[in-house]
Image: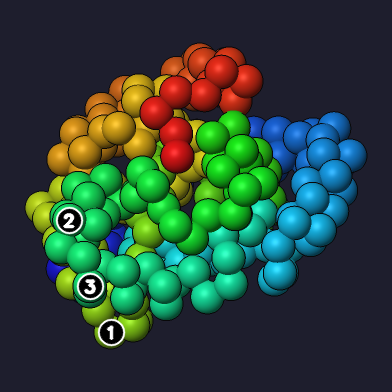
Amino acid sequence: MNKNSYAKSIKHKPLKRLFDIFFSLFIIILLSPFYIIISLLVLLTSKGNIFYISKRLGRGGKIIKCLKFRTMHKNADSILINLLDQNKALKEEWENYQKLKNDPRITPIGSFLRKTSLDELPQFFNVLIGDLSIVGPRPFVLIGPKENFQEEIKKYLGDKTEKILSIRPGITGLWQVSGRSEISIEERIKIEENYIDNQSFLFDLNLIIKTIPIIFFPTGAY
């Protein structure tokens, strides 16, 4: 399946989009002091930019650039590629979870931001421009050269690609409240399918409410 065929499965939900816009604006305005404080902490504790741009897989196969507070040292992407090339165990861990539990690239303040998901606050701007939704499947990380992206998509999503890419990925979702980093890729895809099959406004609202305690009492995040 190529990118053009992914687009055929796109599902449009105008009311969900309207909620995303208003909710994102509310959060950005409400938490603006936190944006400033976290930005200063990132700048003062390690060298590099305040924000990190992560290449992710969006709706319809579009490559999106997710904005996050930087939690890693400079050149993190190239460091990751070298790590996976040199260490078979780390490569297997990444392929199973798309995460590394003891990631040597993470800064001291970055570890706290990731566990509390505060590093993802800038993604509300991604919601405003339409790349993300508040609630949806978690966008898959893409690493390496662009010409390998199709291979990565096929490897992780397989015959579920069209279904998973039919809606916008989300900042939070069923995966985030079900164990997060401790869940394998295969289990994660089943969870994302479950969300797509049962999504509704009330279901989304329930997941948003369940996300709040995870920020203050994080489990399964690293």
Q: Earlier in the sequence, mark 1 or mark 3?
A: 3
Please rate how many residues cluster around mark 3, counting C-alpha atoms within 10 Å: few if below 14, some from 14 to 19, many from 20: few
The picture places residue 124, in percent across and down from the top left corner, at 67, 46
Write down the quadrant of residue 1 in the picture: bottom left
List the residue tagged with mark 1.
147
The picture places residue 76, in percent across and down from the top left corner, at 49, 69
The picture places residue 164, in percent across and down from the top left corner, at 28, 47
In the image, taking residue 125 as reference, residue 35 lies left or right, namely right
The single residue placed furthest to the left in the displayed view is 159
Number of the front mark, 1 or 2: 2
List the residue tagged with mark 2.
89
| Colour logic | rainbow
Number of the front mark, 1 or 3: 3
Q: Nearer the viewer, residue 169 or 182?
A: 182
In the image, taking residue 22 as reference, residue 98 lies left or right, namely left
Q: Looking at the image, can residue 151 be seen?
A: yes
Write down the quadrant of residue 222 in the picture: top left
Query: Which element type, helix, strand or loop, lies under badge 3?
Result: helix
